[in-house]
Image: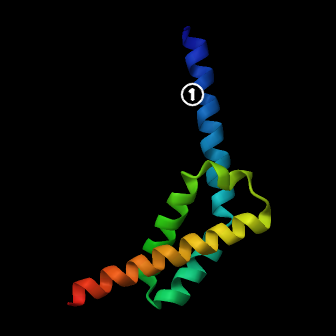
Amino acid sequence: MTVHMLEGKRESALSVCNKKTGLLRQYEDYCYQIAFYMLRNEGQAMEAAQQALTSLYKCHEWFELSESGRLAKVKHAALMQSLESKKRGMSRAL
């Protein structure tokens, strides 16, 4: 494999990463709003939203969904991460 081929693959991978990140950024506020509604704590909500978006970044199918499908998955991921955060908080309190 030549240097030019390797550079092309790297640029292609960066392009895909940038596209995925750009699409996820469109859902950041929505994800955070759901997490904050559940947790009523800014720090926990930011952490839960970050974890939810990270899990969606790794889910290749999410990027193939329609707008409504992506919204539903974002909501589900935010709710699940918020519940996990609440569980961790409760177990620390015990």
The answer to which of 37 and 21 lies nearer the viewer is 37
The C terminus is located in which quarter? bottom left
Q: Disc 1 on helix, strand or loop?
A: helix
- Quickly name the residue at label 1: 10
Q: Residue at the location (66% across, 51% down)?
A: 61
Relative horizontal placement of residue 47, taking residue 8 as reference (left or right): left
Q: Residue at the location (63% across, 69% down)?
A: 74
Kindly indicate the quadrant of the structure image that contains residue 30. Answer: bottom right
Image coordinates of residue 1 in percent, x first then y, are 55, 8
Relative horizontal placement of residue 2, taking residue 83 as reference (left or right): right
- Residue type, numbered disc 1: Arg
In the picture shown, does residue 13 fall above or below 5? below
Residue 41 visible, this angle: yes
Kindly indicate the quadrant of the structure image that contains residue 72. Answer: bottom right
The answer to which of 73 and 3 lies nearer the viewer is 73
Image coordinates of residue 78 in percent, x first then y, are 55, 74
Residue at the farthest top position: 2
In the picture shown, does residue 2 fall above or below 17? above
By what rule are the colours in the image chosen?
rainbow
